[in-house]
Amino acid sequence: MTPGLPTPGPSRTGIRLDALDVRPYRLPLRHPWHSARGLLHERRGWLVRAESDGVCGYGDCAPLAEAGTESVTTAGRALRQLRGQLPGLPIDAALCRVALGGSTTPGASYAVECALLDLQSRLAGVPLRRWLLGSHAEAVSDWIELNAVLGPAIRITEEGIALAVESGYRVLKVKVACADPDTEIEHLARLSRALPTDARLRLDANGGWDLDTAGRVIAALSGLPIESLEEPLDRPDSAGLARLQDSTPFPLALDESLVRWAERDDSGPFPVRRAVIKPAVMGGVAATLGLAGRLRRLGIEVVLTGIIDSAAGLWATAQVSAAAQSPIPQGLATSAWLARDLGPPPIPKLGRLALPDAPGSGFEPFHAGGGA
C-alpha cells in the first residue's frame, strides 16, 4: 500500500505486476485554452496501462509545465524508467517505488500510481474511491458537484452563462487577468446581471496581477456574486496574500503556488481560505489525499482539479476527488474541451458527476493500448 493512504479492504495479497505499458497520444482541443500565460491548443501525453492476471488499470500522464508538472521530456524519461523497473514486483512494492519520484516527476508518478491503484481496485472488485478509503469507504459519496468551465471573462456572453445555468451549474469558473483589468471588471459586472440569485462566479487569475492591481480589482468586484478568486498574485508571498485575504469578502485560493507552500518545512499558517489541488502537480494520489486532509483539518476549503486531462486522467481524478470528500464544487468539468479522447469521459449531468459502482476508476479505452 502506498504510504499516506488508508489501509484498503481485502485484496489478493502479494500479486505481482505483469506489465506496464505506455502509449503516446496527442488530443486536439475544441477551442484554445486561455490563461494569463498564453494559449494551449492540444494535450500531449501517454496512456499508462498496468496489467496483472489479465486485468488492466489505467493512468494518464499529460505533463503541463506551466501548471507545475515536469516537462514532457522529463516525464517521458521517467515513464520509460518505471516501465523497465516495475514489472515483476508486487503491486504494493511498485507503488512504494513510484512514490519516491513524486516530487521530481509528479505527472509521471501520478499516472503510474493511478494505473496501479486502478488495477488493485479492479482486482479487489471495488470502485477506486472506496478502495482508497478502505475501512472508511462507507462515508464516500457516489457523486461530485462540479463547477462549469467557461474560459476568459471577456469572451463569455450572457448566452453562455444561461447555457451553463440551464445545464445545472451554480458555480461558473471564469479566467481573468487575460485583458485590461477595467475591461474585465466591466464585463464581469455585465455577466453577473445574467446570473440567477443562487449562482456565483469562480475567478482564476493564474498569477496575473501585482498586489496593487489585485487589490483594486477585488475592491471593484466586492458587490458582485463572486464565489472565489484563485491565484491572484504574480509574486504570491504569504504575507501579501494574508493581507489581501483579510480585506476580501470571498475566499482567495492558492493553485500554482500551492506546491511551494506545501514543500516548506515551516510553511506557517495557510494565508488564504481555499486550496486548489492538482494531483498531477502534487505527485500522486497519496500526496493529494494527505494534503487535502491536512488542509481541511485546518479549516481550509479544498478543490480538486485536473490539467485538461484525457478521459483516463479525468476518471481517476474524479475518484480521488470523491475520496477527498470536499463539499464544495470541484473543477472536473473539462471533458468537452477535448475534440477527441482516449475513451468515454465522465459526463456531468445537472452540474454533478455520478461515479460508477463498478470496480476501478470507470475508464475504459476505445482501443487496447500497446507499448510505446
Image: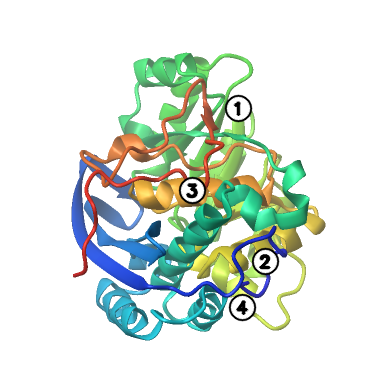
Amino acid type at image mark 4: Glu
> Circle 4 is placed at which residue position?
263
- The mark found on residue 225 in the picture is 1
Q: Secondary structure at mark 3?
A: loop
Amino acid type at image mark 3: Ser
Q: Secondary structure at mark 2?
A: loop
Q: CA distance from mark 3 to mark 2?
A: 16 Å
Mark nearer the viewer, 2 or 4: 2
Residue ID at (71%, 40%): 249
Is 187 or 321 nearer to us in this picture?
321
Residue ID at (21%, 40%): 340
- The mark found on residue 5 in the picture is 2
Contact between labelled residues 1 and 2, with CB atoms less than 8 Å apart: no
Q: Compared to 95, does 295 lie above or below?
A: above
Say which label, 2 or 4, has the lower sequence index.
2
Q: Secondary structure at mark 1?
A: loop
Is 299 or 80 nearer to us in this picture?
80
> Circle 3 is placed at which residue position?
361
Mark nearer the viewer, 4 or 1: 4
Q: CA distance from mark 4 to mark 1?
A: 33 Å
Q: CA distance from mark 2 to mark 4?
A: 19 Å
Is 350 or 143 nearer to us in this picture?
143
Say which label, 2 or 1, has the lower sequence index.
2
Residue ID at (67%, 58%): 292
Contact between labelled residues 3 and 1, with CB atoms less than 8 Å apart: no
